[in-house]
Amino acid sequence: MKLLKHIVLFFSLVVLASCGSSKPTTIENKTITFKETVHDTVFKIEKDSSSYLALLECQNGKVVIKEVTRAEPGRNLNIPKVRLDSNQLKIDCEARAQELLAHYKETHTATVQTITNTVEVNKLTFWQRLQIWGFRMYSILLFLFAIWVYLKSKI
């Protein structure tokens, strides 16, 4: 009697365990992508000029500047510096420093979140597979028994 209780309890536990459904697997991927782009920009600088107009005179066989009639600076150029040394004319034009190339960065952030929820449809439990294989074995044995009975009746 005690053995029968243990067998019924074991059978009940197997049946209850086979009816439970397992939770589907969930896969979650979260990808954050940072893309930084460096841009170069070239600025176009317009032409610039400065002018210097002076009257020259000869004194004792040497050229000298008599009078400066006009000296105009440009947007980026200063007024030219003019020197006369031993009959040589030297002109220096200096420009203020200019920024020709500018860099700026642009950052893009892209977030991709993928959640894969696997749903298994009609997955057979262990108990169901056991019943299917048991029926197959039973069918094969029944077929063999029917052939054996048929052959026995012929003889």
Image (tube, grey):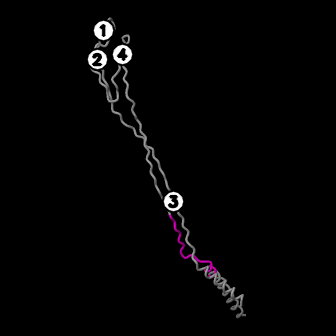
| SS assignment at label 1 | strand
Residue 105, magenta (yes or no): no
| 15 lies above or below 22 | below
Mark identifier at residue 39: none
Which residue is the site of mark 2? 68
Which residue is the site of mark 3? 30
Q: Position of residue 60 (x, y in %)?
A: 32, 5
**Gap in Å between the C-alphas at discs 1 and 2?**
15 Å
Q: Quadrant of residue 124?
A: bottom right
Q: Position of residue 17 (x, y in %)?
A: 61, 79
**Gap in Å between the C-alphas at discs 4 and 3?**
73 Å
| SS assignment at label 2 | strand
Q: Residue at x 38, y 10 (%)?
A: 86
Q: Earlier in the sequence, mark 4 or mark 1?
A: 1
Which residue is the site of mark 4? 83
| 55 lies above or below 99 | above
Q: Residues within 10 Å of mark 1 (few under 14, many from 20)?
A: few
Which residue is the site of mark 1? 58
Q: Residue at x 57, y 74 (%)?
A: 22
Q: Earlier in the sequence, mark 4 or mark 2?
A: 2
Q: Earlier in the sequence, mark 3 or mark 2?
A: 3
Q: Earlier in the sequence, mark 1 or mark 2?
A: 1
**Gap in Å between the C-alphas at discs 3 and 2?**
75 Å
Mark 4: which amino acid? Answer: Arg
Mark 1: which amino acid? Answer: Cys
Tell me where the magenta segment starts and ends, as one range: 115-131
Q: Earlier in the sequence, mark 1 or mark 3?
A: 3
